[in-house]
Amino acid sequence: MRAKELRDRTDEELRTTEANLRHELFTAKFKNHTNRLYNSSELTKKRHDLARVLTILRERELSHGSKSQESEE
């Protein structure tokens, strides 16, 4: 996933993507631990994708927070 693609999604879609990635990462870790994971680079890819999603959600949270603080003053 590219950050540009993720930025085009809504917050709800990003939260769904986050949940899916967390589940996929858990499954990949479990498979890796039991030696059934064919490609161990999946772990890194899934971690990076999850970090991208969380970063975008946090950026939006902070931008909405700064806008509401400006309107209060």
Image (cartoon, rainbow, N blue to C red):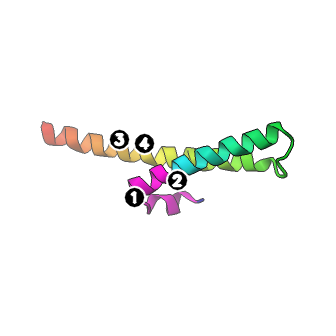
Using residue 62 as the reference point, say whether residue 21 is left or right of it: right
User: Residue 44 placed where, x, y %?
Assistant: 71, 45
Amino acid type for the residue under numbered disc 4: Arg
Q: For the residues marked 3 and 2, what is the alpha-carbon distance in whole angstroms? A: 20 Å
Q: Amino acid at mark 2?
A: Thr
Q: Which residue does the numbered mark 4 point to in the structure image?
A: 58
- Contact between marks 4 and 1 (CB within 8 A): the answer is no
Circle 1 crowding by C-alpha within 10 Å: few under 14, some 14–19, many from 20: few
| Contact flag, marks 2 and 4 (Cβ < 8 Å) | no
- The image shows residue 10 at horizontal and vertical percentages of 39, 58
Q: Looking at the picture, which amino acid does disc 3 mark?
A: Leu
- Disc 3: which residue: 62
Asked if marks 2 and 1 touch (Cβ < 8 Å), the reply is no
**Do the residues under discs 4 and 3 have CB atoms within 8 angstroms?**
yes
**Mark nearer the N terminus (2 vs 4):** 2
Q: Quick check: 38 left or right of 60? A: right
Q: Which residue is at a point 60% across and 50% down the rendered structure image?
A: 49
